[in-house]
Image (cartoon, rainbow, N blue to C red):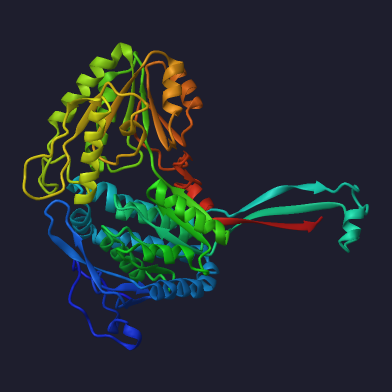
Amino acid sequence: MSAARSTAAGGGAAHGKGAGGKAAGGKAPGGERLFIGGEWVTPDDGHYDVIDPATEEVVGRAPEASRAQVAEAVTAAREAFEGWSRTAPEERAAVLGRAAEVMRREFVPYAELAQAETGATTATARGMQVGVSLARFQRYARGALEPVETALPPQVNEAGHGGTSHALKAMGDGKAGIFGALAVRRPVGVVTCITSYNNPWANAAGKVAPALAMGNTVVVKPAPQDPLSVYRMAEALAEAGAPPGVVNVVTGARPEVGEAAVAADGVDMVSFTGSTAVGQKIAEECGRGMKRQLMELGGKGAALVFDDADLETAVAAIGTTFSFYSGQICTAPTRVLAQRGIHDRLVAGLARYAERLTVGDPRAPGTVVGPVISAAHRDRIEAYAELAVKEGARLVTGGQRPPGERGFYVAPTLFADCTNAMRAVREEIFGPVVVVVPFDDEEEGIALANDSDYGLLDYVFSADVARAFRVAGRLRAGGVGINTVGRNMEAPFGGFKRSGVGRDVGSYALHAYSEMQSIVWPG
C-alpha cells in the first residue's frame, strides 16, 4: 500500500523527502505533491492556489508538474502496463471494488472537498460527484469480469473445404478449408485522461475505472481549477491495492502539463472531456502519433417543445440548466425550440421557475444555484448575456450579477425572441443561461435543432410518443431524451459533429478503452 489516507482536504505540511524528491514514508501529502509510480513526488515547478468559487478563499495548494515529471509519470505507467494488463480480471475487479469502499468510507470529507473546489451545492457534491464516482467504480468492478471474447461463425475459404487457393499458396501456406475465429478485446496500453472542471469526481471515475478494468494504466491530468479531488481518488486506489504506476496524477495550471501528457511517446490513447477548441488541438497531436482518442466535447442541446407537450414537465426539465452545476454541463438543454402555440406560456413558465431559485452559498440547505467555477468564467457568461441583448434577444429574467461581495455567481438568465443566427444561440456558454427560439411546424423544428455545430444531447417534449420517436430519429445528436433530461447510465454516451468522437458509459466504456484483436485458426 503506497499511500495512507489523508484527512486534509486541501493539503498538509510538506513531509520529508527521500531520493529523487519523493515523499518519505508513503504518507499522502493531501494534494501538495504529484502521484507518480506509487510515490508522492515534490513538484519541480512549485504550486498554485485552488480557489473556492463560493468564498474566493484558498482551498489548497496544487502541484505544478514539469514536462520531465509528466514524462516520468508516462514511463511509470508504461512499466506498470505489462503486469497490470496480465492480472486476472478478478484481481482488477477487487481493486476497483475496494477503492469504491474507500470512497464510501470517506464520503463526507470527499464531498466537502469537491464542494470547496467546484462550488457545487451539497446535494450535487454528494450525489452527483462523489456518489456517481463510487457507483462507477462499483460498475466497472463488475465490468472487469465481462467477457472480452466473441466467437465468430466458421468460414469456408474460396477454394472450398480441403482445397488450396492461389492466395494461400502465395503466402506460403498450402492449407485451406474451414477457419474459426475469435474477436478479442485487448487493453489499449497507457491512457492519458484529461478531465473537466465541472465534476472532478464523476468525470475522472468515468475514465479511470473502465480503463483500469480493461487492463490499461493511466496518467490523469485534472482540470487546473479543481485537481485536489483527483488526488483523493489516487489515494483510494493506492489503499485498495493498485500497483505502483497503474495510476499516476500530474497537475498544473500551465497548458504545458496537459500538452506533455498528450504528446508523450509512451501514451497510446487520450481520453479528454472539455471544450471543442481544446479537443481539436488534442486530436491534431493524436493524429501525428496515431493515438486512439475518446473525445467528449462541447454541447448546445436543443429542446424541442411541441404544442401538445406537458409544459410543467418541460419547464422542470429545461430548468435544470439554471441549477444543475449552475449550467456548467455540456448536456444541458440550453437551446429551447418552442412551437408557437405554447411559446409564450413556456417562456412565462421558465421565467417563474428561474426567479424562484435560490442563488447563494452552496453549503446553505436551501441553495439551488451555486457559483460558477471562476471569476474569468463568470465574466465570460456575462459577456454572452450582453452580446445576446446587442443581437436583439429579449432579456426575460436574470442578466444581473446577484448581490454579494464574494463568490463567482451568475443569476439564472432567460432570453426570448432569439434566432438561430445569434452567437448566444449557436455557441456554448456553459452557464445558467437559456435561449428560446420559436418554430412553426415539425420540419422547421428539426431543421433548427440540426442547424448547429454541436450534437451531444437533444430533447423532445411531446404527448405524441410516435412523433417524439420519429423526430428523435432525425436529430443529429448522440443522444435524445424524450420528455426527460434523465440519463440511462448503460446507454452509450458521446456526440455527433463537433461534440466528440467515440462513446463511453456502461459496457461501451469498456469497448472504448480496448483494441480489437482477431485470432484465426484452421478447422
The residue positioned 37% from the left and 26% from the top of the image is 420
Q: Is residue 247 above or below residue 500?
A: below
Q: Which image quadrant for residue 167? A: bottom right
Left or right for 501, reference 13: right
In the displayed image of the protein, which residue is found farthest to the bottom? 19
> Residue 454: where, in percent of width, then height?
43, 37
The percent coordinates of residue 267 (x first, y second) are 50, 65
In the image, what residue occupies the spot 17% across and 33% down? 399
Q: Residue at x 19, y 26 (%)?
A: 395
Which quarter of the image is occupied by the C terminus? bottom right
Residue 365 sits in quarter: top left
Query: The N terminus is located in which quarter?
Result: bottom left
Residue at point 93%, 52% (across, down)? 163
**Vertical relation: 95 (above or below) 474:** below
Residue 355, position as x, y percentages in the image: 14, 29
Question: Nearest the camera: 472 or 66?
Answer: 66
Outermost residue toward the top in this view: 341
Q: Quadrant of residue 468?
A: top left
